[in-house]
Image (cartoon, helix red, strand yellow):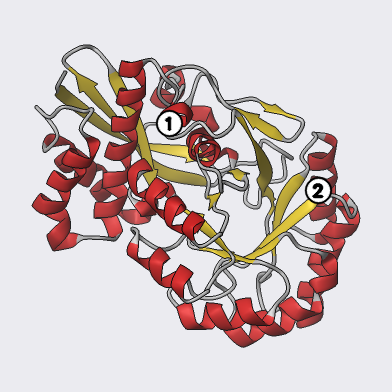
Amino acid sequence: MKIASYEASTLLIPEDDPLADMPEEVGRKRPIVILRLRTDSGIEGIGVTFYGGAMTGSLRVAAEELAALTVGEDPMRIEHIVAKLNNGTGDSCGPGGLYQLALSAIDVALWDIKGKALGQPLWKLLGGHRDRVPTYASGSLRRGLTDDQAQKAAAILVRKGFKEMKTQMALPGNPTIADEIRRVRVVREAIGPDIRLMCDINQRWRPEQAIDIGSRIEDVGLFWLEDVTRADDFQGLARITAALKTPIAGGEYVYGIEPFRQMIQMHSVDIPMIDICRAGGVTPWMKIAGMAEAFNLPVVSHVMPEILCHLIAACPNGLTVEYMPWMLCLYEETPAIEDGMMVLPDKPGLGLTFDEKAIAAFRA
């Protein structure tokens, strides 16, 4: 079996909130790139990548140029193909940026092909540690909402059966410390003491702010504080992690494997969060998870739950899946949620099929 052809497309998908119908900005769209790798035996593997922003057109071209290098290769030899792409391109323009994002789509598509060829779902190919995983609602409790909107959205998520959910601090404008503290307490009051509540800062605090505000809300009982300061400030993150009782999560903004070694060795985070696009695909994601396991650390996923549920389920230190529903609209069917858990599919590969009507409607 050989890779015979490829096709990449740019889409604009709605960045709405199907979980609680409380979008931060009505009508906002997110540009993404989808990739199809086709083999001479008729198997098609799919991949998705994004973060290109205004350069999404360039990301699509990068995905096509890398995919062209895979034509004629055996898709079962994933490490061989990744090495070929690294040697041919990555040594010059990576790791990081558009190269890593494009590589991710190819790597995911290769694993999809491998699973389909072997008749096994990806989570079993990668280890099969469990067949369902905890998941938390994400995207409904964003910082741009009013307190009243955040409370209503939180109550809806509880009624829908979510046992974990994430909110945000670092509010818009120039909030006071009292404003910041009020928001997270408002959400906690709405959901009660038994729901696991995470809080994302999106790199918007300085280390001293994170330590100050973080220490004032320790009684809220957050499951973690996320990306509390600049992702590449490993020393600052280590200061925050050492100072606070609340676990610190981070890693979604860094590219490739090496930064995670630095973060883990410097005790920058308690919970590595691995983004599959910036990591470079399934292959490096699982290597990072293994490295974290060696240091007795859990790992969590970032967005794309329909794909990342496989990886969290595969490894023994997978903690929970971020249920960010932005891209679920791309597929005919996605994994079900039962009692706050994602149920892993038995279909081979990713177990996903593009909804062709949706793809046509979202084309940029």
Secondary structure found at label 2: helix
Which residue is drawn at the image coordinates 43% and 39% (left, top)? 12
Query: Residue 324 bears which disc, if any?
Result: none
**Could you tell me how far apart the alpha carbons at marks 2 and 1 are, in whole angstroms?**
29 Å
Q: Which residue is mark 1?
A: 362
Relative vertical location of residue 88 with respect to residue 357 in this rendering, above or below: below
Q: Which residue is mark 2?
A: 154
Q: Is residue 126 visible?
A: yes
Which residue is drawn at the image coordinates 90% and 58% (left, top)? 189
Q: Position of residue 289 (x, y in %)?
A: 46, 51
Q: Is residue 357 left or right of residue 364?
A: right
* Picture quadrant of residue 161: top right
Q: Given the image, on which type of amino acid does mark 1 rest?
A: Phe
Q: Nearer the viewer, residue 54 or 121?
A: 121
Q: Given the image, on which type of amino acid does mark 2 rest?
A: Ala
Q: Position of residue 175 (x, y in %)?
A: 72, 78
Relative vertical location of residue 212 with respect to residue 301 in this rendering, above or below: below
Q: Is residue 327 left or right of residue 76?
A: right
Are there few (<14), some (14-19), or many (20+) residues within 10 Å of tag 1? some
Which residue is drawn at the image coordinates 41% and 29% (left, top)? 125
Secondary structure found at label 1: helix
Q: Is residue 294 left or right of residue 172?
A: left
Q: Position of residue 99 (x, y in %)?
A: 24, 53
* Picture quadrant of residue 202: bottom right
Q: Position of residue 216 (x, y in %)?
A: 80, 79
Question: What quarter of the picture does the N terminus occupy?
Answer: top left
Q: Nearer the viewer, residue 242 or 184?
A: 242
